[in-house]
Image: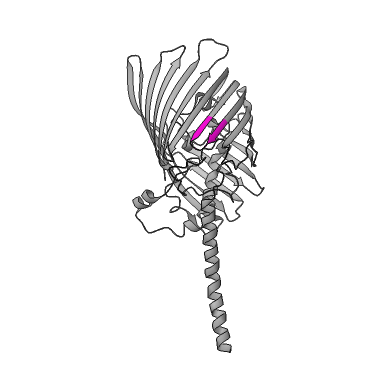
């Protein structure tokens, strides 16, 4: 009897892990098949895998239009690597890239993110993922009898992001090792250096040097831009970073980004003045709206002092449903402190964008863009009309972009530009 009881006990113990493993597999399959709303990027328990393939006849709502800091979606992806990084298939480096199934375009995804995710049993860090990025383009520009062709190196970055042993604390460090002509190397060397705390549900507290949410496109990561270049209001008012403390919240019907910090745009600038930045989005359909699509109404304010006082008011409306994506953004400023520098001009601008995804990999997109650099002067409007074709070979990790831009300036000759750009995120 003792021998029989021992055999039954051993069989039971062997059967339990098999049953649990089978149950976990069924749960995993259910999670992969159930669509999760992509804009919930701050909730680490609800993010959708970047590598889940999307059928060609069913384009998901994966255009982020309402998350105020999509850069931080990287941390969601890092948390998803718990099991994948331990089960990397034996394949060549080229084979791993070729066979990866990356289709999402709402967040930056790295081709070798599984292979380059390192875990630590000892020390302060839990996981770290280094990365390398490249964005460059060949452009042809002509105006009247003047024609030029040049190569533009937009970004070459190296960096890492990761989490500490305490899962509520994460970090990112990004550097620009290649300088840009006409800019200070030391000022631009550090691209990101910040800590994130996620201990408060639905919130992130960010401290350090990071991207400012001035407008929607002005606050977007460079790696998920719909066009090669930002709109004129995004270039003049946004596309900046600063030393600041932020509180970012994300709920079903509203998300917001509030920050207080330095008006200096680079770390060596120190504290030339204080700056407040706030943005809020209202989502009438909520986060889970596959039936009706995503409808977002947003607005924000940026104000501070950097040699002059400046203030910018912005408004935004967007709608995204399956293959269609469209938005309208407008802003008015009494002085500004964007990537083009400090300006005391009273200016304003607007941009309307519409796009259609024929497949998860091919998108046709267009934009009408207007900017008035000085409202006190008449006849100086600048309008840009852009048509673009995006080929997402591997989501945002490997893509090719073709843009045609017609620039109509009231106080200058008209010009044309064709840009062929490539993006690689490793």
Q: Give the quarter of the image for residue 243.
A: top right
Q: Where is 112 relative to 142, above or below? A: below
On the rendered structure, is 255 left or right of 356? right
Pinpoint residue 122: horizontal percent, then vertical percent.
54, 61
Give how far across and how far down residue 64 sits, in percent: 53, 38
Can residue 90 be found in the magenta stretch?
A: no
Looking at the image, is 27 positioned above or below residue 379? below
Q: Residue at x 47, y 49 (%)?
A: 52
The image quarter in which residue 342 lies:
top right
Q: Quadrant of the N terminus?
A: bottom right
Q: Nearer the viewer, residue 176 or 354?
A: 354
**Percent x, y of residue 233:** 53, 24
Q: Which residues are magenta?
A: 318-326
Nearer to us in this view, 217 or 295: 295
Q: Hey, which residue is sitting farthest bottom in the picture?
A: 1
- In the image, residue 142 sits, relative to residue 252, either above or below, namely above
Q: Is residue 320 magenta?
A: yes
Task: Kindly identify the residue that appears in the image at 47 percent across and 38 percent down.
Answer: 223
């Amino acid at each position: 009897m003792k021998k029989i009881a021992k055999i039954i006990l051993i069989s039971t113990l062997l059967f339990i892990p098999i049953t649990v493993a089978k149950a976990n597999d069924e749960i995993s399959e259910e999670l992969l098949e159930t669509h999760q709303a992509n804009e919930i990027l701050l909730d680490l328990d609800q993010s959708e895998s970047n590598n889940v393939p999307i059928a060609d006849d069913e384009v998901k709502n994966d255009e982020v239009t309402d998350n105020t800091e999509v850069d931080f979606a990287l941390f969601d992806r890092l948390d998803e690597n718990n099991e994948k990084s331990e089960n990397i298939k034996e394949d060549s480096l080229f084979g791993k890239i070729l066979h990866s199934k990356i289709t999402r375009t709402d967040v930056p995804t790295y081709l070798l993110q599984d292979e380059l995710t390192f875990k630590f049993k000892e020390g302060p860090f839990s996981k770290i993922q280094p990365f390398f990025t490249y964005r460059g383009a060949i452009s042809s520009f002509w105006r009247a009898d003047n024609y030029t062709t040049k190569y533009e190196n937009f970004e070459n970055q190296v960096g890492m992001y990761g989490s500490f042993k305490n899962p509520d604390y994460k970090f990112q460090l990004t550097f620009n090792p290649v300088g840009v002509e006409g800019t200070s190397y030391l000022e631009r060397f550090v691209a990101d250096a910040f800590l994130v705390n996620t201990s408060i549900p639905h919130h992130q507290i960010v401290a350090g040097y990071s991207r400012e949410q001035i407008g929607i496109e002005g606050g977007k990561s460079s790696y998920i831009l719909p066009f090669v270049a930002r709109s004129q209001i995004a270039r003049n008012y946004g596309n900046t970073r600063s030393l600041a403390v932020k509180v970012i919240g994300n709920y079903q019907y509203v998300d917001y980004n509030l920050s207080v910090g330095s008006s200096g745009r680079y770390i060596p600038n120190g504290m030339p003045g204080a700056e407040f930045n706030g943005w809020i989005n209202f989502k009438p359909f909520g986060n889970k709206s596959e039936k009706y699509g995503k409808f977002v109404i947003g607005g924000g304010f940026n104000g501070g002092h950097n040699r002059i006082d400046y203030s910018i008011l912005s408004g935004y409306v967007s709608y995204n449903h399956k293959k269609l994506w469209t938005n309208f953004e407008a802003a008015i400023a009494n002085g500004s402190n964007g990537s083009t520098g400090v300006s005391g001009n009273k200016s304003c601008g607007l941009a309307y964008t519409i796009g259609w995804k024929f497949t998860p990999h091919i998108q046709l997109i267009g934009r009408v863009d207007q900017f008035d650099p000085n409202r006190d002067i008449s006849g100086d409007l600048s309008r840009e009309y852009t048509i673009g074709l995006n080929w997402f070979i591997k989501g945002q990790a490997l893509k090719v972009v073709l843009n045609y831009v017609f620039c109509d300036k009231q106080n200058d000759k008209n010009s044309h530009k064709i840009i062929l750009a490539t993006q690689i995120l490793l």
